[in-house]
Image (cartoon, rainbow, N blue to C red):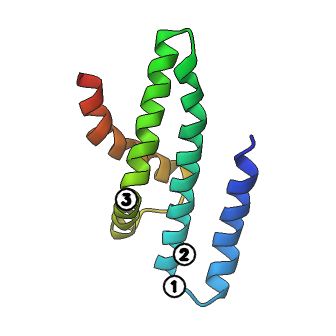
Amino acid sequence: MKTLVPMITLMVIAFLVVPAMGSDEAQTKRLVYEVAIDDEIAQSRQMTSLLTSRSAKLRMKGHREASKAMFLEAHRDRLVDDMVKMNLEPKDYKVDRFLNDRFTCTCYATWAAK
């Protein structure tokens, strides 16, 4: 809930201010994607508190979320470029699915096998 207000604020800025400044559609989408990735990183970092849980499954979830946050931080620019190239609609569920698919196909698949 705490991250919802800043996310909504940034989305409003992205949709109202950036187009008014004369930026083209690709720049607007790029900003939306960057905000979405930053929000996903923040959410994943919050979930890392599960690392201290007594439950083994919750600790695994915390570790996975920590790995996801590191992946998103390391590959942020490339992910944004890929979304722009794909002309991905800037809808939350589509961006979330794209990020989850990329993480699952690269880092998590390797990590889960260990």
Looking at the image, which residue is at 55% across and 55% down?
A: 38
Crowding at dot 1, Cα within 10 Å, few <14 / some 14-19 / many 20+, comes out as: few
> Which dot, 1 or 3, sits closer to the camera?
3
Vertical order, 114 against 38 (above or below): above
Position of the N terminus by quadrant: top right
Identify the secondary structure beneath mark 2.
Answer: helix
In the rendered image, which residue does mark 2 sit on?
A: 28
Residue type at numbered disc 2? Thr
Residue type at numbered disc 3? Leu
Which residue ends up furthest to the front in the rendered image? 52
Question: Residue 57, position in %: x, y?
Answer: 47, 14
Are discs 1 and 2 less than 8 Å apart at CB? yes
Looking at the image, which residue is at 24% across and 32% down?
A: 110
Looking at the image, which residue is at 54% across and 75% down?
A: 28
Residues at marks 1 and 2, CA–CA distance in whole angstroms: 7 Å
Residue 7 visible here: yes
Q: In which quarter of the image is residue 84?
A: bottom left
Q: Of the residues under marks 1 and 3, which one precedes in the sequence?
A: 1
Q: In this view, does 43 lie to the left or right of 59?
A: right
In the rendered image, which residue does mark 3 sit on?
A: 79
Looking at the image, which residue is at 46% across and 43% down?
A: 69
Residue type at numbered disc 1? Asp
Identify the secondary structure beneath mark 1.
Answer: loop
Are discs 2 and 3 less than 8 Å apart at CB? no
Crowding at dot 3, Cα within 10 Å, few <14 / some 14-19 / many 20+, comes out as: some
In the rendered image, which residue does mark 1 sit on?
A: 24
